[in-house]
Image: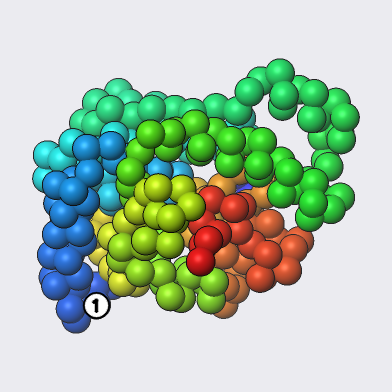
Protein backbone atom coordinates (compact mmCIF):
# COMPACT_ATOMS: atom_id res chain seq x y z
CA UNK A 1 0.00 0.00 0.00
CA UNK A 2 1.56 3.33 -0.95
CA UNK A 3 0.51 6.24 1.21
CA UNK A 4 1.51 9.88 1.06
CA UNK A 5 0.77 10.28 4.76
CA UNK A 6 0.42 7.84 7.66
CA UNK A 7 -2.95 6.08 7.52
CA UNK A 8 -5.74 7.83 9.37
CA UNK A 9 -9.22 6.33 9.92
CA UNK A 10 -11.54 7.70 7.25
CA UNK A 11 -14.47 7.37 9.65
CA UNK A 12 -12.84 9.92 11.99
CA UNK A 13 -11.42 12.17 9.29
CA UNK A 14 -14.33 12.39 6.87
CA UNK A 15 -17.64 11.68 8.64
CA UNK A 16 -19.84 14.76 8.36
CA UNK A 17 -23.54 14.35 7.74
CA UNK A 18 -25.41 16.89 5.61
CA UNK A 19 -28.21 18.78 7.36
CA UNK A 20 -30.73 16.78 5.31
CA UNK A 21 -28.99 13.43 5.69
CA UNK A 22 -32.05 11.70 7.20
CA UNK A 23 -34.10 12.65 4.13
CA UNK A 24 -31.34 11.41 1.79
CA UNK A 25 -31.16 8.09 3.61
CA UNK A 26 -34.95 7.69 3.41
CA UNK A 27 -34.78 8.48 -0.32
CA UNK A 28 -32.02 5.90 -0.82
CA UNK A 29 -33.98 3.24 1.05
CA UNK A 30 -37.08 4.00 -1.03
CA UNK A 31 -35.10 3.79 -4.29
CA UNK A 32 -33.74 0.38 -3.24
CA UNK A 33 -37.16 -0.91 -2.15
CA UNK A 34 -38.71 0.36 -5.39
CA UNK A 35 -35.98 -1.22 -7.51
CA UNK A 36 -36.47 -4.54 -5.75
CA UNK A 37 -40.26 -4.34 -6.19
CA UNK A 38 -39.98 -3.49 -9.90
CA UNK A 39 -37.35 -6.05 -10.92
CA UNK A 40 -36.91 -9.74 -10.28
CA UNK A 41 -33.60 -9.78 -12.17
CA UNK A 42 -31.54 -7.10 -10.46
CA UNK A 43 -27.98 -7.02 -9.12
CA UNK A 44 -25.71 -4.62 -7.30
CA UNK A 45 -22.30 -4.01 -8.87
CA UNK A 46 -19.86 -3.67 -5.98
CA UNK A 47 -16.28 -2.43 -6.29
CA UNK A 48 -16.04 -2.95 -2.51
CA UNK A 49 -15.45 0.80 -2.17
CA UNK A 50 -17.12 2.93 0.51
CA UNK A 51 -20.30 3.64 -1.43
CA UNK A 52 -20.78 0.02 -2.41
CA UNK A 53 -20.37 -1.42 1.09
CA UNK A 54 -23.14 0.98 2.17
CA UNK A 55 -25.49 -0.21 -0.56
CA UNK A 56 -24.79 -3.88 0.25
CA UNK A 57 -25.41 -3.09 3.93
CA UNK A 58 -28.78 -1.47 3.13
CA UNK A 59 -29.84 -4.32 0.84
CA UNK A 60 -29.17 -6.76 3.68
CA UNK A 61 -30.83 -4.54 6.31
CA UNK A 62 -33.94 -4.09 4.18
CA UNK A 63 -34.07 -7.80 3.36
CA UNK A 64 -34.20 -7.16 -0.39
CA UNK A 65 -33.79 -9.91 -2.94
CA UNK A 66 -30.82 -8.40 -4.77
CA UNK A 67 -27.61 -10.26 -5.58
CA UNK A 68 -24.29 -8.47 -5.18
CA UNK A 69 -21.52 -9.07 -7.69
CA UNK A 70 -17.85 -8.13 -7.70
CA UNK A 71 -15.57 -7.98 -10.73
CA UNK A 72 -12.29 -9.58 -9.71
CA UNK A 73 -10.09 -8.27 -12.50
CA UNK A 74 -7.06 -10.24 -11.34
CA UNK A 75 -5.38 -6.93 -10.50
CA UNK A 76 -7.17 -5.88 -7.29
CA UNK A 77 -5.31 -4.77 -4.14
CA UNK A 78 -4.89 -7.45 -1.51
CA UNK A 79 -6.88 -5.20 0.86
CA UNK A 80 -9.83 -5.35 -1.53
CA UNK A 81 -9.61 -9.14 -1.87
CA UNK A 82 -9.41 -9.46 1.92
CA UNK A 83 -12.59 -7.37 2.27
CA UNK A 84 -14.31 -9.59 -0.30
CA UNK A 85 -13.34 -12.64 1.76
CA UNK A 86 -14.70 -11.04 4.92
CA UNK A 87 -17.98 -10.16 3.20
CA UNK A 88 -18.33 -13.69 1.85
CA UNK A 89 -17.62 -15.13 5.29
CA UNK A 90 -20.22 -12.83 6.87
CA UNK A 91 -22.76 -14.29 4.40
CA UNK A 92 -25.29 -11.49 4.84
CA UNK A 93 -25.89 -11.49 1.07
CA UNK A 94 -25.06 -13.79 -1.82
CA UNK A 95 -21.97 -12.41 -3.57
CA UNK A 96 -21.09 -13.47 -7.09
CA UNK A 97 -17.52 -13.00 -8.29
CA UNK A 98 -16.96 -12.56 -12.02
CA UNK A 99 -13.48 -12.88 -13.48
CA UNK A 100 -11.99 -12.34 -16.93
CA UNK A 101 -11.10 -15.27 -19.15
CA UNK A 102 -7.70 -16.42 -17.85
CA UNK A 103 -6.42 -17.61 -21.23
CA UNK A 104 -7.30 -14.30 -22.87
CA UNK A 105 -5.59 -12.32 -20.09
CA UNK A 106 -2.42 -14.41 -20.46
CA UNK A 107 -2.47 -13.93 -24.24
CA UNK A 108 -3.08 -10.17 -23.86
CA UNK A 109 -0.14 -9.73 -21.47
CA UNK A 110 2.11 -11.89 -23.66
CA UNK A 111 1.23 -9.81 -26.70
CA UNK A 112 1.28 -6.30 -25.19
CA UNK A 113 3.52 -6.63 -22.11
CA UNK A 114 3.00 -6.22 -18.35
CA UNK A 115 3.12 -2.42 -18.46
CA UNK A 116 1.12 -1.91 -21.66
CA UNK A 117 -1.63 -0.02 -19.82
CA UNK A 118 0.78 2.87 -19.32
CA UNK A 119 1.84 2.93 -22.99
CA UNK A 120 -1.38 4.26 -24.52
CA UNK A 121 -4.96 5.03 -23.58
CA UNK A 122 -6.11 2.57 -26.24
CA UNK A 123 -4.27 -0.29 -24.54
CA UNK A 124 -5.45 0.82 -21.09
CA UNK A 125 -9.04 0.84 -22.31
CA UNK A 126 -8.52 -2.52 -23.98
CA UNK A 127 -7.34 -3.92 -20.64
CA UNK A 128 -10.50 -2.52 -19.01
CA UNK A 129 -12.57 -4.12 -21.77
CA UNK A 130 -11.02 -7.52 -21.17
CA UNK A 131 -10.84 -7.47 -17.38
CA UNK A 132 -13.93 -5.40 -16.55
CA UNK A 133 -16.39 -4.86 -19.37
CA UNK A 134 -16.60 -8.45 -20.56
CA UNK A 135 -17.07 -9.83 -17.02
CA UNK A 136 -19.61 -7.04 -16.41
CA UNK A 137 -21.60 -8.11 -19.46
CA UNK A 138 -21.52 -11.68 -18.15
CA UNK A 139 -22.67 -10.56 -14.68
CA UNK A 140 -25.54 -8.52 -16.08
CA UNK A 141 -26.74 -11.03 -18.65
CA UNK A 142 -30.53 -11.39 -18.33
CA UNK A 143 -30.81 -8.60 -15.75
CA UNK A 144 -33.38 -5.85 -16.17
CA UNK A 145 -31.70 -3.56 -13.67
CA UNK A 146 -28.50 -2.95 -11.76
CA UNK A 147 -27.44 -0.81 -8.84
CA UNK A 148 -24.27 1.25 -8.58
CA UNK A 149 -22.61 3.54 -6.04
CA UNK A 150 -22.23 6.52 -8.38
CA UNK A 151 -22.50 9.92 -6.70
CA UNK A 152 -22.78 13.31 -8.41
CA UNK A 153 -19.98 14.73 -6.31
CA UNK A 154 -17.41 12.18 -7.54
CA UNK A 155 -16.44 14.00 -10.74
CA UNK A 156 -17.64 16.47 -13.36
CA UNK A 157 -18.49 13.52 -15.59
CA UNK A 158 -20.88 12.27 -12.89
CA UNK A 159 -22.38 15.64 -11.94
CA UNK A 160 -25.72 14.83 -13.58
CA UNK A 161 -26.08 11.24 -12.38
CA UNK A 162 -29.79 10.58 -11.73
CA UNK A 163 -31.19 8.34 -9.00
CA UNK A 164 -32.80 6.23 -11.71
CA UNK A 165 -31.03 6.19 -15.07
CA UNK A 166 -33.03 4.90 -18.02
CA UNK A 167 -30.49 5.72 -20.73
CA UNK A 168 -29.38 2.08 -21.05
CA UNK A 169 -32.92 0.82 -21.38
CA UNK A 170 -33.28 1.10 -25.16
CA UNK A 171 -29.82 -0.26 -26.03
CA UNK A 172 -29.20 -2.77 -23.26
CA UNK A 173 -32.67 -3.41 -21.86
CA UNK A 174 -31.92 -2.45 -18.29
CA UNK A 175 -32.28 0.39 -15.82
CA UNK A 176 -29.44 1.65 -13.65
CA UNK A 177 -30.21 2.72 -10.08
CA UNK A 178 -27.81 5.12 -8.35
CA UNK A 179 -29.33 5.32 -4.86
CA UNK A 180 -26.45 7.38 -3.41
CA UNK A 181 -26.45 9.95 -6.23
CA UNK A 182 -27.21 12.78 -3.80
CA UNK A 183 -24.87 11.76 -0.98
CA UNK A 184 -21.76 13.73 -0.12
CA UNK A 185 -18.48 12.08 0.83
CA UNK A 186 -19.15 13.25 4.39
CA UNK A 187 -22.56 11.51 4.33
CA UNK A 188 -20.88 8.29 3.17
CA UNK A 189 -18.44 8.26 6.07
CA UNK A 190 -21.02 9.42 8.58
CA UNK A 191 -23.16 6.39 7.71
CA UNK A 192 -20.24 3.94 7.68
CA UNK A 193 -19.19 5.20 11.12
CA UNK A 194 -22.72 5.19 12.49
CA UNK A 195 -23.52 1.67 11.25
CA UNK A 196 -19.97 0.37 11.87
CA UNK A 197 -19.81 -1.05 8.36
CA UNK A 198 -16.65 -2.98 7.45
CA UNK A 199 -14.73 -1.07 4.76
CA UNK A 200 -11.59 -1.18 2.66
CA UNK A 201 -8.58 0.05 4.71
CA UNK A 202 -7.20 1.68 1.56
CA UNK A 203 -9.64 4.51 2.38
CA UNK A 204 -7.64 5.11 5.56
CA UNK A 205 -4.55 5.45 3.34
CA UNK A 206 -6.11 8.27 1.28
CA UNK A 207 -7.52 6.23 -1.59
CA UNK A 208 -11.02 7.74 -2.04
CA UNK A 209 -11.74 5.81 -5.24
CA UNK A 210 -10.48 2.24 -5.43
CA UNK A 211 -9.92 0.24 -8.60
CA UNK A 212 -7.17 -2.07 -9.80
CA UNK A 213 -3.80 -1.82 -8.03
CA UNK A 214 -1.73 -0.81 -11.09
CA UNK A 215 -4.17 2.01 -11.89
CA UNK A 216 -4.99 3.48 -8.48
CA UNK A 217 -2.94 5.60 -6.08
CA UNK A 218 -3.49 7.61 -2.93
CA UNK A 219 -4.31 11.29 -3.46
CA UNK A 220 -2.82 14.40 -1.88
CA UNK A 221 -4.81 17.00 0.00
CA UNK A 222 -6.78 19.16 -2.44
CA UNK A 223 -6.59 16.74 -5.38
CA UNK A 224 -9.88 15.83 -7.12
CA UNK A 225 -11.74 12.76 -5.86
CA UNK A 226 -10.75 10.59 -8.83
CA UNK A 227 -7.22 11.96 -9.29
CA UNK A 228 -5.81 8.65 -8.07
CA UNK A 229 -7.49 6.65 -10.83
CA UNK A 230 -5.40 6.34 -14.03
CA UNK A 231 -3.37 9.24 -12.64
CA UNK A 232 -1.30 9.55 -15.78
CA UNK A 233 -4.33 10.27 -18.01
CA UNK A 234 -6.44 13.38 -18.68
CA UNK A 235 -9.23 13.96 -16.12
CA UNK A 236 -11.95 13.72 -18.79
CA UNK A 237 -10.82 10.21 -19.80
CA UNK A 238 -11.03 8.71 -16.32
CA UNK A 239 -13.72 6.11 -16.79
CA UNK A 240 -13.27 2.43 -17.51
CA UNK A 241 -16.43 2.16 -19.62
CA UNK A 242 -18.66 0.65 -16.93
CA UNK A 243 -20.54 3.92 -16.48
CA UNK A 244 -20.38 5.60 -19.86
CA UNK A 245 -23.87 6.89 -20.55
CA UNK A 246 -25.31 5.76 -23.84
CA UNK A 247 -27.63 8.72 -24.38
S1 LIG B 1 -8.24 -0.49 -14.16
FE1 LIG B 1 -6.15 -0.90 -14.97
S2 LIG B 1 -5.60 -3.04 -14.51
FE2 LIG B 1 -7.84 -2.72 -14.13
S3 LIG B 1 -8.79 -3.41 -16.00
FE3 LIG B 1 -8.53 -1.19 -16.25
S4 LIG B 1 -6.48 -0.89 -17.18
FE4 LIG B 1 -6.61 -3.04 -16.50
**Which sits in the foreground, 7 or 232?**
232
Mark 1, secondary structure of its residue:
loop
* Percent position of residue 75, x then y: 63, 35
At 71% across and 49% down in the image, what residue appears?
Answer: 125
Task: Give how far across and how far down residue 120 sits, in percent.
Answer: 84, 53
Residue shown at the point (44%, 27%) measured from the top left = 97
Residue 65 is situated, as x and y percent measured from the top left of the image, at 18, 36
Q: Is residue 182 above or below residue 61?
A: below
Q: Is residue 245 left or right of residue 87?
A: right
> Can you name the residue that lies furthest to the bottom here?
19
**Residue sitting farthest toward the top:** 103
| Rendering colour mode | rainbow
Q: Quadrant of the N terminus?
A: top right
Query: Is residue 130 left or right of 208 when viewed as pictured?
Result: right
Q: Which residue is mark 1?
A: 18
Q: Quadrant of residue 107?
A: top right
x then y, percent, for residue 155: 52, 71
> Which image quadrant is residue 214 in?
top right
Residue 47 visible in rendering: yes
Left or right of 126? Residue 60 is: left
Amino acid sequence: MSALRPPSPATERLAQASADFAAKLAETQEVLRGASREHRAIKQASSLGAEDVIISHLIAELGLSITVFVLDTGALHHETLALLERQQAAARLPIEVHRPNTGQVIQWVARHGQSAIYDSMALRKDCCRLRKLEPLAQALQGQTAWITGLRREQSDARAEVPLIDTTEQASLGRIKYNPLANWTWGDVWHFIAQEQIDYNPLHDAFFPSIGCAPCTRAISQGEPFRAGRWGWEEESAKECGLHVRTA
